[in-house]
Image (cartoon, rainbow, N blue to C red):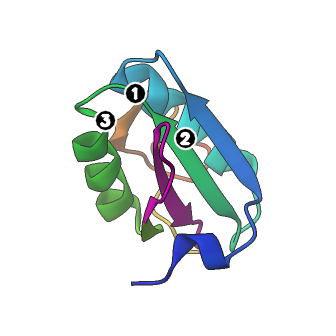
Amino acid sequence: MTNPTASAVDITVDGTGLLRVTLLLKLRAYAADAEPGSVVHVIATDPAAPLDLSAWWHMTGHTYLGPVPDPDRDVYALRLTADALPTRPDAPWHPGGRQDGTKG
């Protein structure tokens, strides 16, 4: 696994205080507008967030880089891939159709 601190961070998604569903909505929105290859750090305070984040990365095909050492908060890193599978904008835990999230 790649050391997430070795890469420059392009995007930080601050999920402090967000429930995992809201965090996934926010992460998906950032990922939809970002360039492939971007490194994203996700700050998560919901104890269940790591499970949902892991499932989302696996479902979409983005590259999970691992937890980021931080003594004050839980941070996870991923690299966005060009060939990621889309998810629904309103429900990122469900596969989407085209890149805009519509079926077709």
Answer few, some or many: residues within 10 Å of disc 2's Cα (few below 14, many 20 plus, some between 14 and 19): many
**Which residue is located at x 40 percent, y 27 percent?**
45
Residue type beneath disc 2:
Arg
Looking at the rendered structure, the secondary structure element under dot 2 is helix
Residue type beneath disc 3:
Ala
Judging by the rendered image, the residue that carries numbered circle 2 is 28
Q: Is residue 58 visible?
A: yes
Q: CA distance from mark 3 to mark 2?
A: 14 Å
Which of discs 1 and 2 lies nearer the camera? The answer is: 1
Q: Which mark is residue 45?
A: 1
Looking at the rendered structure, the secondary structure element under dot 1 is loop
Rendered view: 82 above or below 101: below
Residue type beneath disc 1:
Thr
Q: Is residue 104 visible?
A: no
Give the mark nearest the N terminus, 1 or 2: 2
Answer few, some or many: residues within 10 Å of disc 3's Cα (few below 14, many 20 plus, some between 14 and 19): many
Q: CA distance from mark 1 to mark 2?
A: 17 Å
Judging by the rendered image, the residue that carries numbered circle 3 is 49
C-beta proximity under 8 Å, tags 1 and 2: no
Which of discs 3 and 2 lies nearer the camera? The answer is: 3
Locate residue 69 relative to residue 58 in the image: left or right. right
Span shown in magenta = 67-82
Question: Is-magenta flag for residue 19?
Answer: no
Locate residue 88 relative to residue 37 in the image: left or right. left
- Residue 47 percent coordinates (x, y): 25, 30
- Residue 34 percent coordinates (x, y): 75, 55
